[in-house]
Image (tube, rainbow, N blue to C red):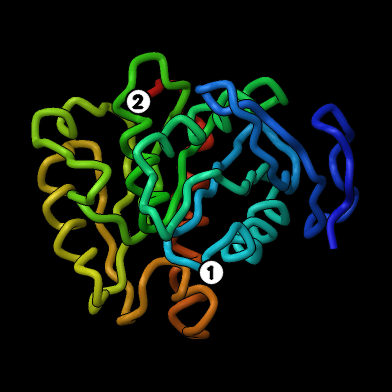
Amino acid sequence: MGDSADATGSAPERPGSYREVTFPAQDGATRSGRLFGDGSVAVVLSYMGRSGDSQDDWKTFAESLAEHGYQALTYAREADSEQNDFVDHWRDVLGAATFLRDHGAETVIAGGASIGAVASLHAAEQPDNGINAVLWLAGLHETDSYEFSKADVARISCPIMFVSGEGDAYGSAESARLLHDWAPTSELLFIESYRHGTDILTHDETSARTLSQAMLEFVKRMEDQDATC
């Protein structure tokens, strides 16, 4: 159960708690979300795109970030998984990044799983994006809504972490390898799991610990990252 407050409310007293907030996406539409923790480093966490996926899938990791002195923002997007209308999801990411900067963040990491990862990387391709790093979990280099080119990815100048279950049934491991080859500032990690994205966090106890620790260490390394993507 979260601590409810408006966007200007004080930080939660307990690291694992959150306050409910709203923020405008870049297209002007309002999104609702949960803000965990406090600190100058903040992570946007965008969830996957299947029916039943939600911001709840990131809750445990968001709590871990808060416990380590970081902000984490999860949110409910408007895109409909049944209609696969994710083409503007990157605008949510940019709106979330702006919100976090307006509320004390000096370093913002765009993190996401599956379509959330794809939208995060696409957001980092945009000019004046306000993003300092990208945490990509189990995205694909080509979807119905997005397609990345070698030239565009190579121009992203901020750190990127590409992560996937090594046996991911959706093919994200292959996409991670390809994008890592294209991105000169990236690192690549495979987790021993066949599950997709945040399913690793919610279903594989041992792999969940490995994945959470790796993502947390990446966030820690970004504490002094000043340049944007």
Q: In x, y percent, where is residue 171?
A: 19, 68
Count numbered badges in the picture: 2
| Above or below, comparing residue 165 to residue 25 in the picture | below
Residue at 38% over, 46% down:
85
Q: Crowding at label 2, few (<14), some or many (≥20) Cα neighbours within 10 Å? A: many
> 149 left or right of 99?
left
Q: Nearer the viewer, residue 32 or 158?
A: 32
Residues marked 1 and 2 touching at CB (< 8 Å): no
Q: Nearer the viewer, residue 91 or 181?
A: 91
> 34 left or right of 26?
right
- Helix, strand, or loop for circle 2? loop
In the picture, the disc for residue 87 is: none
Cα distance in 3D space between marks 1 and 2? 31 Å
In the picture, the disc for residue 229 is: 2
Q: In x, y percent, where is residue 188?
A: 25, 56
Q: In x, y percent, where is residue 65?
A: 64, 53
Q: In x, y percent, where is residue 54?
A: 57, 61
Residue at 47% over, 52% down:
80
Residue at 84% over, 39% down:
11
Q: Say what amino acid the circle numbered 1 marks.
A: Gly
| Rendering quarter of residue 177 | bottom left
Tell which tag, 1 or 2, sits nearer the viewer: 1
| Quadrant into which the N terminus falls | bottom right
| Above or below, comparing residue 132 to residue 144 in the picture | above
- Helix, strand, or loop for circle 1? loop
Residue at 44% over, 29% down:
132
Q: Crowding at label 1, few (<14), some or many (≥20) Cα neighbours within 10 Å? A: few
In the picture, the disc for residue 52 is: 1
| Quadrant into which the C terminus falls | top left
